[in-house]
Image (cartoon, helix red, strand yellow):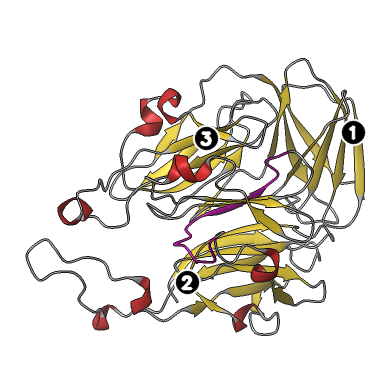
Amino acid sequence: MWSIHAAWLDFDRDGWLDLFIVNYCAWDPAREPFCGERAPGRRTYCHPRQYAPLPNQLFRNNGDGTFRDVSTESQIGRHLGKGMGAAVGDIDEDGWPDVFVANDTEPNFLFRNRADGTFEEVAAEWGVAVNQFGAPVSAMGADLRDVDNDGHLDLFVTDLANEGFLLFRHAGTRFDDVSNLSGITRSTLPYAGWSNPVADYNNDGWKDLFSANGHVTDNIEAIQGRSYRQGNALLLNRGNGTFQDVSAKAGRDLTRPGAHRGAAVADFDNDGRLDLVVTALGERATLLRNVSTPEGRWLMLRLVGRASNRDGLGTVIRLTLDDGRVLVNHATTSVGFASSSDPRVHFGVPRHRTVERVTLQWPSGAFQTIERPALNRILTVEERK
């Protein structure tokens, strides 16, 4: 198996984290075809169509330090694709974690958890299998987050240059492609995007979009005159359904060209401003420390599961503000392409606002409430037994 990405989730809600593996395609170095021109320096990587797709895998945690492959019985293994990234979240809000898989040049997968140990592939029904023109893209990374603050998970997907990244807005029983309406398409056409953690990078209460960028073909400059090394991108959420590319204002370190691939988000210095780690082929990883002036305050939750899994992955958290607005986030480490982020759950709180209550819905099904927490702090929350 050519495995690309791994995601932890408690798919059966037994309190033990299970493992979802995203696989790409069948590749044998002994049978590698020749692609490109025969002239020196003109050979290129072959298109994915040259290779057979693979099934993804699901391993159930036995609770004794071992795992059992349940890919077949869960029906995950019935679907062949060319997976690059995965995002975990409860898209139908039934309390059970679902999995989105970004496929390269193939329709994406959305595995809906049936709550009986099996999954149903529903990407077409939910409107996320292809783009708004009905075509599959070279999907690379994915993240499920509520970007419009309506309480439902939206989906952000990166792909390659000239395709335009995809933003799908949750619309109840399906997603709507709002890539053009949000300004995402226009801003991202030049980029070949990979890992894409969605988070509130300026603490204004609205989640922003980041993408690690770099062309896939290392000799693209000789073939097409495009740049192999690209700068990363940061798109600021305006709070009105649109996003603004503020990459140039985010600093030279963020936009320094490279063959970037992985990206994970965490607050490394615990100052409430989310930082990033970005990898690049042939180079050391870059730690991007957030030194921007925050637009508001913040709250970070460190979860300790008891009946639920240890890190509380899958917990849905709602912050009710003093003006009645509700901010939603959820605990997951799986993000983007080949990346895993901090399990702590971060919220930016708008300026001049306070938090009336924090409501947690644990994977066990238990609800827990914290009244009027102090802000600008890391709050450890232990699940009540």
**Residue 356 image position (x, y, % from top left):** 89, 26
Q: Mark 1 points at which residue?
A: 370
**Which corner quadrant of the image does residue 33 belong to?**
bottom left
Crowdedness of circle 2 by 10 Å Cα count: few (<14), some, many (20+)?
Answer: many
Query: Which quadrant: the N terminus?
Result: bottom left
Query: In the rendered image, which quarter is residue 150 located in?
Result: top right
Residue 257, compared with residue 122, is above or below; it is: above
Q: Is the magenta stretch mostly helix, strand or loop?
A: loop
Mark 1: which amino acid? Ile
Mark 2 or 1: in front is 2
Q: Name the residue under label 2.
A: 82
Q: Does the magenta stretch include residue 197?
A: no
Quote the CA–CA distance across marks 2 and 1.
43 Å
Q: Position of residue 112 (x, y in %)?
A: 73, 69
Q: Marks 1 and 3, how far apart in space?
A: 32 Å
Q: Is 63 in front, or is 211?
A: 211
The vertical placement of 357 against 366, above or below, is above
Q: Which residue is identified by label 3?
A: 235
Give the structural element (helix, strand or loop) at label 1: strand
Residue at 24% over, 55% down: 218
